[in-house]
Image (spheres, coloured by chain):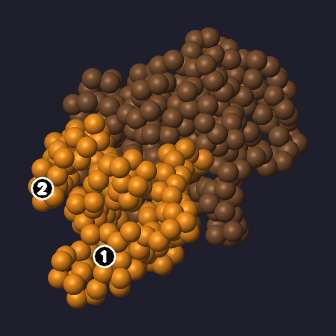
Amino acid sequence: MAYRWKNTLTAEDATPYSAFLNRRQMMAGMAAGGIAGAIPKGATAQEVLEPNTWEEITNYCNFYEFGTGKEDPARYADALTIDPWTVRIDGLVDKPGDYNFADIMSQMTIEERIYRFRCVEAWSMVIPWNGFELADLLEWVGVQSSARYVAFETAMRPDEMPGLSSPVIDWPYVEGLRLDEAMHPLTIMATGIYGRDIAKQNGAPMRLAVPWKYGFKSIKSIVRISLVEDEPPTAWNKYSAREYGFYSNVNPEVDHPRWSQATERRIGGGLFAKRQPTLMFNGYEEDVASLYQGMDLREFF
Amino acid sequence: MLDRANTLLRRIPAWGLYLVAPVPVIWIYLLGLTGELGVDPAKRIEHQLGLWSLWLLIAGLAVTPLRRFAGLNLLRFRRAIGVITFFYILAHLLTWLVLDVQFQGVWADIVKRWYITVGMAGFVLMIPLVATSNDWSLRKLGSVTWRKLHRLVYPIAILGALHFLLLTKGFQWEPLLYALVIAGLLLSRTRRRHSRPNRVAA
């Protein structure tokens, strides 16, 4: 059951890549319902989101397996073998196993999602993803009732990933979501950008895209998905629990210990780009705030 | 070989450094303006200026050990190196202030964020040094007081190294390397001081 969430764009607005480049003024962001009624504080009713260019998206990446420089992934990710690609799905599922990426794709409905992308480092982009809802994949493999969380793991291949030779964090990169977050219609497995296969430096062949959380939650080049009972360890949280919480929802009111999260620099604006206010839940408050009802977001940051 | 180098160096006027110093700064800003620095030029310039500032700090600190252990005399250039270091740090600071954070919550940053506190402290400590980097101040203060004052460069270098160490995400070699080089340059002095009195620098 795809298409649970829609951009304010209709299906007719989905454009081929070439047309995209000519006509990049896009409406996106708000859920199909409730546009007029409840607007996140600080956001305009129908914000015009202009996606970043393919060049920007593919040349400015944090993918430390390929090095810590923003341009290292673009330089080195070519070595990554993505065909064949196997994803192990295990834990509390009805049909555990090693799934071929192509087989997964044959079962899923690919749709376009233009999402804001907000990095914990206080920069942001707008990315026209293609992908499928994670919920569809989880339903396909059958989630057992005792499952509470989903754990993800990135490929760890020292021969193909030069960044692994440095102990920047405890490899392999791991991430996790609460099951309701994972099942939320906004949460997708991205397999493309601009209608093209996703670039290796962006996490080919499939990576998570959870638009209301800081970018590092959207784990790349996934080789394992486990349904588990307890909150799984996550890479940056293991490195510094004080700085990177399990939830890591975009929140302008909760600063990172070393910098403010109140504003962000939108990539692509050139040398004098003005900072923009960061939106609660990255502008998806209307869609996801209910997931965290009654939770102190300062404590569960 | 070394004599020739020293003779050659004597012919280069120290003010030449002041002429060359602004070139990289102007160059990197030109690259940023023309889109040659990738998609996030402000951050690139900010980081590059920060790195260059550390290089200059290291160069300034290397003058004495180079003379003592290698016999290479760069003493004539040390004042220029110091003054240029200050202006690089100033350019780094202004880039952060104007292009990166854009004056938003700057005071909160300085008080609350450790790496900014440390960097700012280093910058502030440099102000008396650049203000007294002239012959008049040297005469006025007397060489003993002046030299004592200018030992502030040691804590400044430590703060610079710490600033870099504190701002990285994850474990990274680069800031550690800078910290080790600076630590080495500082240690080379403490050893010496115990064994015999300092020579008076010009």
Crowd rating for badge 1 (residues with CA inside 10 Å; few <14, some 14–19, many 20+): many
> Dot 2 falls on which chain?
B
Whichever of callouts 1 and 2 sits on the residue coming sooner in the sequence is: 2
Residue A132 in the image: x percent, y percent? 57, 30
At x 19%, y 76%, the residue is B134
Residue A190 shown left or right of residue A145 in the figure:
left
Give SS at disc 1: helix
Residue A31, label in figure: none
Secondary structure, mark 2, is loop
- The image quarter containing residue B129 is bottom left
- Quick check: B32 left or right of A170? left
Tell me which chain appears brown: A
Q: Is residue A183 above or below residue A298?
A: above
Taking the spot 63% from the left edge, 24% from the top edge, the residue there is A158
Whether tag 1 and tag 2 are in contact, CB under 8 A, the answer is: no
Residue B195, above or below B145: above
Check disc 2 and give the amino acid type: Pro
Pointer 1: what residue?
B129
Which chain is assigned orange?
Answer: B
Q: Which mark is residue B13?
A: 2
